[in-house]
Image (tube, rainbow, N blue to C red):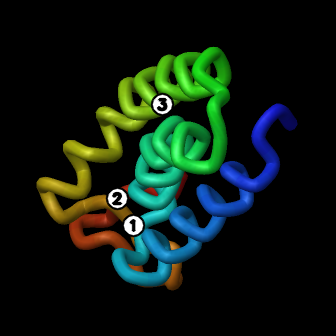
Amino acid sequence: MLAPWAALAAAGVFATGVAMSGWVSLGSVLAASALPLLILALGPARPEAVAAAIVAAIVAWRHRENFARMRDGTEPRARGDAAPGGGERR
């Protein structure tokens, strides 16, 4: 880990995002998006922040179907709530 304190803070963002929304996918995207900012805030690590920003863009792209299900109200929640309309768990 090139930025352990930033990664730890991003884990907190993930946990908070999941706790507040119930969506693991949203917590993942929030944490990935926060990581480059946290890297920059916690130290002058520009190459690591750029790499983390690229990874965050990939994570957001990979979650685009989850975003559509969130918008439609069919994305299952981490709390074990069933998705309306019988959406499948991921």
- Residue furthest out toward the left: 72
In this rendering, is residue 16 above or below 89?
Answer: below
Give coordinates of residue 50: x percent, y percent: 53, 18
Task: Indicate the amino acid at tag 1.
Answer: Pro
Q: Nearer the viewer, residue 10 or 37?
A: 37
Query: Quadrant where the N terminus lies?
Result: top right
State the mark number for residue 49. Answer: none
In this rendering, is residue 78 above or below 8?
Answer: below
Q: Residue at x 51, y 84 (%)?
A: 79
Q: Give the image quarter of residue 76.
A: bottom left
Among the two numbered marks 2 and 1 on one chain, the one whose residue lies closer to the N terminus:
1
Q: Residue at x 47, y 60 (%)?
A: 27
User: Where does label 1 land, which residue?
Assistant: 76
Q: Nearer the viewer, mark 2 or mark 3?
A: 3
Task: Indicate the amino acid at tag 3.
Answer: Ala
Q: Alpha-carbon distance for marks 1 and 3?
A: 22 Å
Q: Residue at x 41, y 24 (%)?
A: 57
Q: Nearer the viewer, mark 1 or mark 3?
A: 3
Q: Nearer the viewer, residue 58 or 69?
A: 58
User: Where does label 3 land, which residue?
Assistant: 56
- Marks 2 and 1 close (CB-CB < 8 Å): yes
Disc 1 crowd rating (10 Å Cα; few below 14, some 14-19, many 20+) is many
